[in-house]
Amino acid sequence: MKRQTTRQALGALLAGLCMAGGAAMAQTWPTKPVTIMVGVPAGGALDPFARALADQLNKTTGGTFIVDNRPGANGNLSAEMALKATDGNTLWIGTQSMMTINPAAFAQLRWKPSDFVPVLKAVEAPLVLVTNPSVKAQNFAELAQWIKDPANKAAYASFSPGTPSHFLGYQLDEKLKAKMVHIPYKGSAPQITDILGGQVPFGFTQLAAATPQIKEGKLRAIAVTGPKRSRYLPDVPTLQEVGQGDLTTTIWFGVFVPRSTDPKLVEQIRSAVMKAHKEPAYRARLEMLNFDVPDVSIPEFESEIASDTARWAALVKATGFKAAD
């Protein structure tokens, strides 16, 4: 009886070791520290999202994930650097403007969207039209009148040339026939800093980055650009509500890897990222950053990228805008 018990115990131990070994073999990603490439400076809206993702992937995979900020040419530098790594140890955070506007805006683009395969559409949000409180406008109608007054010499700030923040300002200027000056920045953090300081009176900016200042009364929110009001700013009307529905848009951040990455490895990466994305605590953290967390399939995401690309390409052509490398 005792011998049988010992034999059973040894059998159970061997089975456990086999199962553990199988699990270890199945857990093949990540095998090395993973770099999350971000094409903007620290601060703003994209950087805290990337850091939240890195923290969550650290927890759910047991691996090491490091955010690497490589600003330059509206994300093109980070894309080029990410494409050099096909071993699954580099993730690229692509944005709507990088993926769908850059191809039309940059004449000498050294990469193309098809070089990447989407892993996940991670977050999305509207932009928000904000003013410095010194601007004597409480709503869109009053802001439009203020912009059209030549005495105010209106200028608008964008968080980067060749982004929705830039083109929405351009379209608004065209509609108001105001001849505003466009003041571009390298990220939403410096854009908001200068609107707060009064160097530029207003602009379309990232909702996630601007909401704290709006709630503290340091910025005045005029309208959001989404198809419906944001739950984070429920008292702020949409552009549709103020008669500017053709300017409606949202921005998104996605996780991508080079298309030359082995498809089996891509699936392992996607599985790990999706598992992290479904964690309630992580989603709550993203919502604390004033992001909406979508649940869309890869085909749906690819379709959205295609439709966004067509929309912005037409606008880039209409404006004659060409970005510098």
Image (cartoon, rainbow, N blue to C red):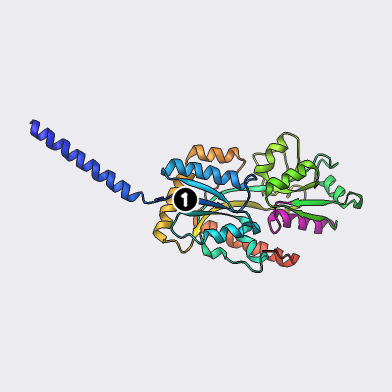
Magenta run includes residue 50: no
What type is the residue that disc 1 sits on?
Val
Q: Main secondary structure of the magenta part?
A: helix
Report the residue at 52% width, 61% height from top: 83
User: Residue 101, percent across and down?
Assistant: 65, 61
Vertical placement of 309 versus 273: above or below? below
* Quarter of the picture holding the N terminus: top left
Tell me the residue at 83%/46% (across/down). 143
* Region of the chain picked out in magenta, as a range: 158-176
**Quarter location, residue 163:** bottom right
Please state if 200 lies on the left or on the right of 302 as rendered: right
Structural crowding at the residue carrying mark 1, measured as other residues with C-alpha within 10 Å and reported as few (<14), some (14–19) or many (≥20) = many
Front residue of 298/28: it is 28
Give x and y (percent) for residue 252: 60, 51
Residue 19 left/right relative to 259: left
Q: Residue furthest right?
A: 151
Instruction: Residue lying at the far top in this picture: please name it.
Output: 2
Residue that label 1 marks:
34
Q: Vertically, is 219 above or below 324?
A: above
The picture quadrant where one finds residue 2 is top left
Q: Is residue 54 visible?
A: yes
Mark 1 secondary-structure assignment: strand
